[in-house]
Amino acid sequence: GDELVSGSKQLIDWNYTSTECVQDMWDELHGKLMSISATVPKSPVYADNRPVDLPWNTSALKRKRKNKDGAWHKFDTTPTESNLSYALEKQSLFEAEDVK
C-alpha cells in the first residue's frame, strides 16, 4: 500500500513545467495525482496477503440483509398484512444492525 504511493511520489516531478496559466498547472497536477491513484488497488482489500473483512460487512449484517430481502420477497408474492408486518420488522432489524 504505502510503498506503491511512496514509489509513485519519487517518480513524479512535482515542479510545474509552466506557472503562467492556472488551468495548465491544474491539468498537470491532476495528471500527476491520477498517475498515483492508478497504482492504488481497487478491490479486494488485502493485508499481509490475506483478504480483509471490511468492518461494515459483518456476517450478522449479511444474515439480516438476507432475512429482510426474503421477507420483502414473501410480501411481494403474497401481499398480506401479516407479511407486510413481518417485512417491516426485518427491515427495521437490518437498519438497526447497519447503523452499528
Image (cartoon, rainbow, N blue to C red):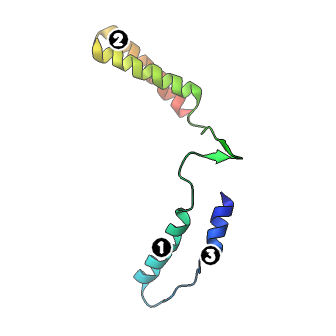
Which corner quadrant holds the N terminus?
Answer: bottom right
Q: In which quarter of the image is the C terminus?
A: top right
In this figure, which residue is indicated by the disc labeled 2?
A: 83
Q: Residue lying furthest front in this view?
A: 49
Mark with earlier residue (3, 2): 3
> Which residue shows up at 49% across the image and 67% down it?
34
Nearest to the eye among marks 2 and 1: give it: 1
Q: Which residue is under mark 1?
A: 31
Q: Nearer the viewer, mark 3 or mark 2?
A: 3
Q: Residue 96's x, y, as percent?
A: 51, 27
Say which element carries label 3.
Answer: helix
User: What is the number of the mark on residue 91?
Assistant: none
**Above or below, comparing residue 80 to residue 48 in the picture:** above
Q: Nearer the viewer, mark 1 or mark 3?
A: 3
Distance of mark 2 from mark 1, alpha carbons?
54 Å
Q: In this view, does 57 lie above or below 86?
A: below
CB atoms of marks 1 and 3 within 8 Å: no
Residue 31 in picture, x, y percent from top left: 48, 73
Q: Does residue 35 lie above or below 100 as drawn?
A: below
Marks 1 and 3 sit apart, C-alpha to C-alpha, by 13 Å
Q: Nearer the viewer, residue 7 or 18?
A: 7
Where is residue 64? Give x, y as percent.
Answer: 50, 23
Mark 3 residue type: Leu
Residue identifier under label 3:
11
